[in-house]
Image (cartoon, rainbow, N blue to C red):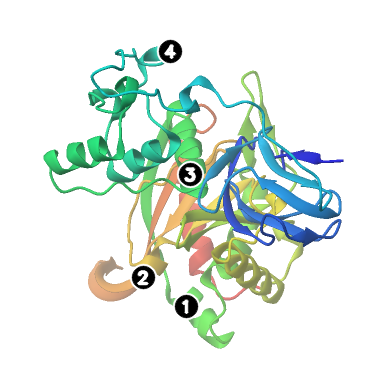
Amino acid sequence: MAHEFLLPDIGEGLTEATIVHWFVGVGDAVDQDAPLVELETDKAVVEIPAPVGGILLHRGAEEGETIRVGELLAVVGEADEAWEPAAPSTEEAAPIVGTLEEAPAVPPTAGGRARALPRVRRLAAELGVDLDGIAGTGPGGRVTEADVRAAAASSGPARRVPLSPRRRAIVRNLTRSWREIPHVTTYGEADAAALLAERAARGGVPLEALLIARIVPLLAEYPAFNATFAEDAVVEHLRYDVGFAVDTPDGLVVAVVRAADTKPVAELAEEVRRLAAAARDRRLGAAELTGQTFTISNIGAVGGRYGTPIVPHGTTAILSVGRAEPRPVVRDGEVVVATEFPLSLSYDHRVIDGAAGRAFLGAVAEALARPSVA
C-alpha cells in the first residue's frame, strides 16, 4: 500500500520549506526512520525521516524547490506498486493540439495571472520577469520560455536573487517589529580598557560573553528592559535569556543564551562559541533561536560603530556595541586619547521613557568600564 507523506509543521509558524537534499532517489529502498530528505525552514536545516519503510515512489519537489506545509512531500510503497498522482490542474493540462493560428485565445487564469507551466514560472522568477506583462506566444496564449527570455533581454541587465527561507523570516520579523514597536534610539560611549584587558587575560574569549556577564545584573535593576509589552500590561521577566546577534552567510541570526544569570564567564564563553558555530552551520534548534528577554548586537565584530538596531518582537530593548578604537576624548577637562565602545540602545517607547533609557545606558557604560567580573 502506498503511503502519502505530507510536509508536517516542524516548527512554530512554519508555512513552507525548501528542499536541500534528497537522501533517496525514486525507485530506491528506504528503511523506516532512516533519513529521507533534508529541508531548510525559516530557522534551521532539518532532516525528515521516512515514516515507513519501502520504495520511494514519488518526490513532491526537487532540490532547490519550495513546498508548503500540508502538500505532498513523498510517497513510499512496495517495489511492484503503481502510484499515480491526482489529476493535474487546468494550468498543467496537456497543450492544445493544433497550430498557433487554429488555437483559440485563452484568457489569463483567475486573478489575472498569465498562463505558464511551472518551469516557465521558475525561469521568470530567476530572471526577474513579470509574467503578467507578457503576451504569450504559446498554444492558447501560454507564456513560453522564449517569451520570458525575450522579455528579460529587452529589460536590460539584471539578476533576480530569490530570498532564502531564513532571509524571508528575517524580513517578516523585522517588518513586524518596525511596524508595531515605536522605536527610540539613544547613544553613548563606554571606556573599553577594562573589558579589553579582561578579554586578553582570559585568552580572547568572545566579547559577547563578557558583555552578557556585565549587563545581566543591570536587567534585574532595570526590569523594564527585560520585559514584553502585552497591550494592557508590561510583563517583566524573572528569567534572563540573552540573545546575541550572529552574522552568518544566510543573514543575521539571534542565538539565545538561556539562564545567563546562572553562568560564570567561562561557561558563557563556551555557550556563545557553541551557539555561534551552530548558527553558521544552520543547526540551531527552535529553542535556541527564540524567546530572548534582551538582545546584544556586537556590530564592532563587522567594523561597525553606531547603529539604529531594531528591537526584536516580544522584547523591549536591544543594545548595539560598536568597534572600540582609540579616539580623542575629554577626561578631567583635558583631551586625551582613549579607547571607547560606541553604544546604541534602541527601546520600546511604549514601555520605556527617554529618562529611563538614558539611565540604563549610563549604567551599561559604568558596568563595561569596571574591572573584571567573576
The Cα atoms of the two marked residues, 4 and 3, are separated by 31 Å
The Cα atoms of the two marked residues, 4 and 1, are separated by 62 Å
Give the residue at mark 1: 196
Report x, y in % for residue 349. Answer: 47, 30
Would you say 83 lies left or right of 130 here? right
| Mark 4 Cα-neighbour bin, 10 Å: few <14, some 14–19, many ≥20 | few
Q: Quadrant of residue 72?
A: top right
Question: Of tags 4 and 2, which is closer to the observer?
Answer: 4
Quadrant including the C terminus: bottom right
Q: Residue at x 37, y 66 (%)?
A: 302
Q: Are marks 4 and 1 in contact (CB under 8 Å)?
A: no
Give the residue at mark 2: 324
The kind of secondary structure element at disc 1 is helix
Going from the N terminus, do you reach mark 4 or mark 3 first?
A: 4
Give the residue at mark 4: 110
The Cα atoms of the two marked residues, 4 and 2, are separated by 58 Å
Q: Are marks 1 and 2 in contact (CB under 8 Å)?
A: yes
* Res 39 label: none
* Res 170 label: 3
Q: Residue at x 59, y 61 (%)?
A: 282
Type of residue at label 1? Leu
